Amino acid sequence: MNISKLLKIFFVILLVITFTIACDVNNNEKKENINKDVNNWPADGLYFMKWDSYHAYFEEEEPYIQLSAIQIHSAKQKNEQSYKKYILLSNKGEITATFTNYLPGPKEEKYSLYTIGLRLPKMKPGKYIISKLKIIDSNNQQKMYDIGKWVIDIKKGFKPKDLDLGKKTFISGYFDWYRVEILNNTREKIHIENLDFQLNTPVKTIIKIGKDFNMTEYFEEEPYIDQGETKVFQFEFVSKVNDSKSKFISLRPVLYYKINNQSKFIILPTAIYSPVVNDKTILELVQSLNQ
């Protein structure tokens, strides 16, 4: 099994762990009236979390996204495998995605959680803004779902060889920072410029440099990497608005840097920011999806 497949499996496991932890945070809440009062819960059916996401890819890559779903059920839930076609609706038209994996999460009295992985085809350079998912089942019945905003940014060119990436952020409960270990493969000094992405969530990005991945000690210097040197960069996100709502963010950002006064970029791996939620929060989230 190659490294990319291992990373993908690890990424999927981490996403499910987040939901598992979320549902186990406060088991006492399962005894609350919120679970006993059927009228509080929306109609049975499938609901997708609305993500605020940005994924950049080079043009030779096949984009990959994961969607978090909540199945509300008073009876046995419909088998997800009965769905046979997934179509993403973007500003550039329909994109037929390939179903790659289904990963069940915790199942409670009123709901079940799971994620689905979708592989998109190679696409021409440009920004594809996706907001809807159309699912067609085995009986050719189709239904449309709002999945938030996914910006798939296809870049011209290929992955540069100037930099190697070591440890990096995979998952976090808060949209607070993106951390990555970077090795300079060249014989020139590389200056880190900025982290670029497009989200609905407005943030200011502050660059910090660490001597190790745990950021136990910081460098008080300009953001550069000497030849053959490895440094850890933490891009801290400072919110520009006072918003306490739960945010589900999937981020695959672009890192711009300069070498010999030439501006270049590399695409960093995906990081997931998913808040810890309990039964009450799940209900509030699903109710908000109907608004």
Image (cartoon, rainbow, N blue to C red):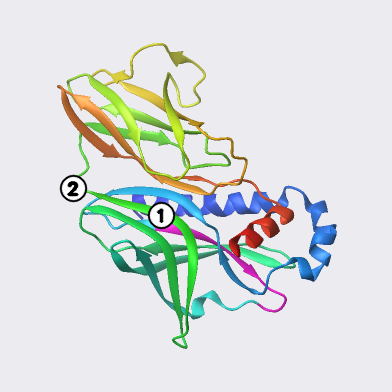
Determine the image quadrant of residue 111.
bottom right
Looking at the rendered structure, the kind of residue marked 1 is Trp
Image: magenta residue range: 65-76
Residue hosting label 2: 156
Q: Is residue 24 above or below residue 42?
A: above
Q: Furthest-bottom residue in view?
A: 139
Q: Is residue 272 left or right of residue 33?
A: left
Let me know if residue 286 is in the magenta part.
no
Binning the other alpha carbons within 10 Å of mark 2 as few (below 14), some (14 to 19) or many (20 upward) gives few
Residue hosting label 1: 150
Let me know if residue 69 is in the magenta part.
yes
N-terminal label among 1 and 2: 1
Q: Furthest-top residue in view?
A: 220
Q: Is residue 257 above or below residue 79?
A: above
Residue drawn at point x = 21 percent, y = 25 percent? 258
**Image location of residue 52, percent across then percent down:** 47, 50
Give the distance between the C-alpha atoms of the residues marked 1 and 2, in whole angstroms.
Answer: 19 Å
Q: Is residue 52 left or right of residue 246?
A: left
